[in-house]
Amino acid sequence: MKKNLFAISVSTLALFFAASVNAQTDPQSDVRDETRSGTFPRPMRVDGPGGYRPSVGLKMGVANPEGSYDSAAEVGVDVGFQPYVPFGFGATFATSKNASQTTAQDLERTSILARGTYNFGGSTPIIRHSWVGVAAGPVFRRDGTDLGLAPVAGFDVPIQDPGGSYFSLGADAKYLALVNSDDSDSLTVTGVLKYWF
């Protein structure tokens, strides 16, 4: 199962990279003008500081581990930027505590995941603000540390004119699998408030 998850994650990124190489877009367009690029923007260097699209966000949602654990809140902080159009890089710090239905020991996890994403473009609502990617990093628990790997997807819709700095509201989902452990995998869905510099 875990090897299949890794293969799916890598294949997804490769598919979107290949699609972006073949996509057509206006090379003179401003990298922040998403309405002038295709759904799969052509890879290009960032043109000017605004093209890096740095952001910081607060996340709150629900973590649903496999097995006999209750769903519970997950909270976190997210940072990111776009070093090369349309690829993003970021990191998320998140923590959750899920009560066990069968034992006295709760499932407590704190993760620090680095994330690589492909950012969509174009003029289609929601899709032009969406992204897919893969995240990986350490997952700390009471009695040890695991390596986590997760396919991720989400969107960030501006709630004001994105001409300069602005806020966005969005959501994302991740399926966190522990590569070196038989501990429960977890599906998490969160809402996100981000500030874009």
Image: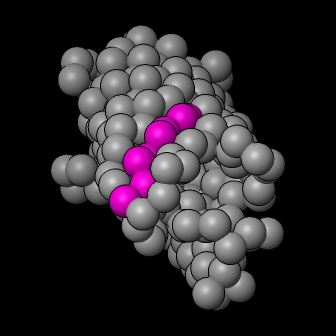
Is residue 161 left or right of 154 when viewed as pictured?
A: left
Horizontal and vertical percent position of residue 164: 40, 13
Horizontal and vertical percent position of residue 43: 63, 56
Vertical comparison of 78 with 180: above or below = above
Horizontal and vertical percent position of residue 24: 48, 66
Residue at figure coordinates x 49%, y 39% from the top left: 96
The quadrant in which residue 157 appears is: top left
Vertical comparison of 102 with 112: above or below = below
Is residue 192 left or right of 179 when viewed as pictured?
A: left
Residue at figure coordinates x 34%, y 25% from the top left: 193
Instruction: Give the position of the N terminus as an image quadrant.
Output: bottom right
Q: Can residue 28 be seen from the camera position used here?
A: no
Q: Which residues are magenta?
A: 94-101
Q: Nearer the viewer, residue 133 or 66?
A: 66
Horizontal and vertical percent position of residue 170: 30, 38
Vertical comparison of 20 with 160: above or below = below
Is residue 96 left or right of 137 when viewed as pictured?
A: left
Q: Nearer the viewer, residue 67 or 154?
A: 67
Residue 99 on the magenta segment: yes
Vertical comparison of 14 with 109: above or below = below
Residue 40 on the magenta segment: no
Residue at figure coordinates x 41%, y 48% from the top left: 99
Provide the major secondary structure of the magenta segment: strand
Residue at figure coordinates x 66%, y 80% from the top left: 2
Q: Can residue 137 be seen from the camera position used here?
A: yes
Colouring method of the image: one colour
Q: Exactly how many numbered labels are in the figure?
A: 0
Q: Nearer the viewer, residue 148 or 105?
A: 105
